Image (spheres, rainbow, N blue to C red):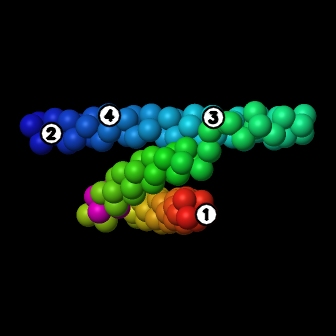
Amino acid sequence: MEQERQTLCRRLADANASLGFLLILIAAILLSFYAASVERRRLCLALAGEEARAAALPDVLPLRWRGSAMVVEALGFFLCLALKNCRQAAAGTDAAARRSAEANLWAAVLVLSAALVRLEDLRALLVRSADG
């Protein structure tokens, strides 16, 4: 009975941490939404011939980089969670659970890889814009 309670407590801790990292993802989406709205405003002002006001708007590149960094952080957590679930499934006898855990692990690896590629691209753009 005590071991079952400990298992439930660990699962609850994972669920709580997942909620926290989902909030980070939501914040990253809101940051990206803000950056896109600033860029849209810049384009509208430029089309209206108000280049000075358009140029006064904040640079969105640092915002996008921060948002991408937040996504990478959250996806790193979810990769660790997928790895943990895969290890637990491998120790069990349910073949369907094992296949599902392996598929989720691959999905987590691929999504994190894509986010890292995006983050590196934004970092390179930031460095280039700082240099010139």
- Residue 14: which disc? none
| Residue 120 horizontal side relative to residue 47, left or right | left
Quadrant of the drawing holding the C terminus: bottom right
Please report contact status of discs 3 and 2: CB closer than 8 Å, yes or no. Answer: no
Residue 121 in sight here: no
Q: Which mark is residue 6?
A: 2
Predominant SS of the magenta segment: helix
Q: Are marks 4 and 2 in contact (CB under 8 Å)?
A: no
Determine whether label 2 and label 1 are within 8 Å by CB. no
Given the image, on which type of amino acid does mark 2 rest? Gln
Kindly state the secondary structure of the residue where label 4 is placed: helix
Using the numbered discs, state the Cα–Cα distance from disc 4 to disc 1 in whole angstroms.
44 Å
Q: Residue at x 39, y 34 (%)?
A: 19
Residue range highlighted in magenta: 85-89
Residue beneath disc 4: 16
Look at mark 1 in the image and give the residue it sits on. 132
Farthest residue, direction right: 48
The spot of residue 9 in percent (x, y) is: 20, 36
How far apart marks 4 and 2 lie (CA) works out to 15 Å
Mark 3, residue position = 34
